[in-house]
Image (cartoon, rainbow, N blue to C red):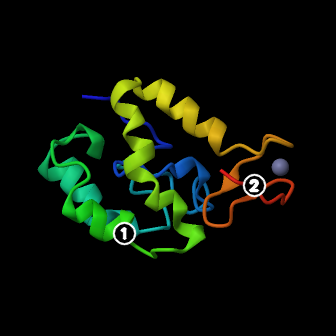
């Protein structure tokens, strides 16, 4: 089984580019209860992956991308550019099957870094959290 990384959610979302990461949430992958944001505990995808399938990432599952992942993440907010980080999961997370998880994380970190200043791009706004520049990921 692939090692769990704090910046990477079981569903494939890159927590590292979430505006809540390291503020009100320590990432979907941790079991640390010491965070304000509570939504991850009831997430059906997270619960299926960790508790039912006993895997660390949905891509390790034969059913990827399954009905739950599509309904809860991939197919939500269709046509909305701000949710591209969800819609792209089948295509982007698929790459992690061939890469090791460290390389995949590096790839994601690079994608979500501002080309001008190196700041983290907020995945809802596609805007750099440091310099405010609009970035196409
Ligand atoms: Zn920037």
Which numbered disc flags the more N-terminal residue, 1 or 2? 1
| Residue drawn where x is 22% and y is 64% of the image | 68
Q: Quadrant of residue 71?
A: bottom left
Q: Nearer the viewer, residue 51 or 45?
A: 45
> Is 8 located above or below residue 11 in the figure?
above
| Residue at mark 2: C-beta within 8 A of ligand 1 | yes
From this viewpoint, is residue 16 visible? Answer: yes
Q: Nearer the viewer, residue 54 or 101?
A: 101
Q: Quadrant of residue 95?
A: top left
Would residue 10 appear left or right of 102 to someone viewing this image?
left
From this viewpoint, is residue 43 visible? Answer: no
Count of number-bearing discs: 2
Q: Nearer the viewer, residue 98 or 56?
A: 98
> Is 114 located above or below residue 60 in the figure?
below
Q: CA distance from mark 1 to mark 2?
A: 23 Å
| Residue drawn where x is 68% and y is 66% of the image | 125
What residue is pinned by disc 1?
A: 75
The x and y percentages for residue 9 are: 41, 49
Would residue 127 appear left or right of 55 to someone viewing this image?
right
> Is 96 located above or below residue 29 in the figure?
above
Would residue 123 appear left or right of 56 to someone viewing this image?
right
| Residue drawn where x is 14% and y is 46% of the image | 53
Q: Nearer the viewer, residue 73 or 2?
A: 73
What residue is pinned by disc 2?
A: 135
The x and y percentages for residue 102 are: 47, 25
> Is 81 located above or below residue 14 in the figure?
below
Mark seen at residue 14: none
> Are circles 1 and 2 on residues that touch, CB within 8 Å?
no
Quadrant where the N terminus sits is: top left
Density class for disc 2 (Cα within 10 Å; few <14, some 14-19, many ≥20) is some
| Residue drawn where x is 20% and y is 63% of the image | 67
Would residue 78 appear left or right of 46 to someone viewing this image?
right
């Amino acid at each position: 089984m692939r090692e769990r990384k704090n910046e990477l959610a079981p569903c494939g979302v890159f927590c590292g580019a979430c505006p809540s990461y390291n503020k009100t949430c320590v990432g979907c992958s941790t079991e640390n209860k010491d965070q304000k944001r509570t939504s991850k505990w009831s997430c059906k995808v997270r619960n299926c992956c960790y508790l039912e399938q006993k895997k660390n990432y949905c891509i390790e599952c034969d059913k990827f991308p399954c009905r739950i992942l599509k309904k809860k993440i991939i197919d939500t907010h269709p046509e909305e550019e701000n949710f591209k980080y969800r819609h792209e999961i089948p295509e982007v997370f698929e790459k992690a099957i061939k890469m090791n998880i460290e390389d995949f994380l590096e790839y994601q970190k690079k994608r979500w870094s501002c080309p001008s200043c190196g700041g983290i791009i907020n995945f809802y706004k596609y805007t750099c959290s440091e310099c405010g520049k609009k970035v196409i990921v």
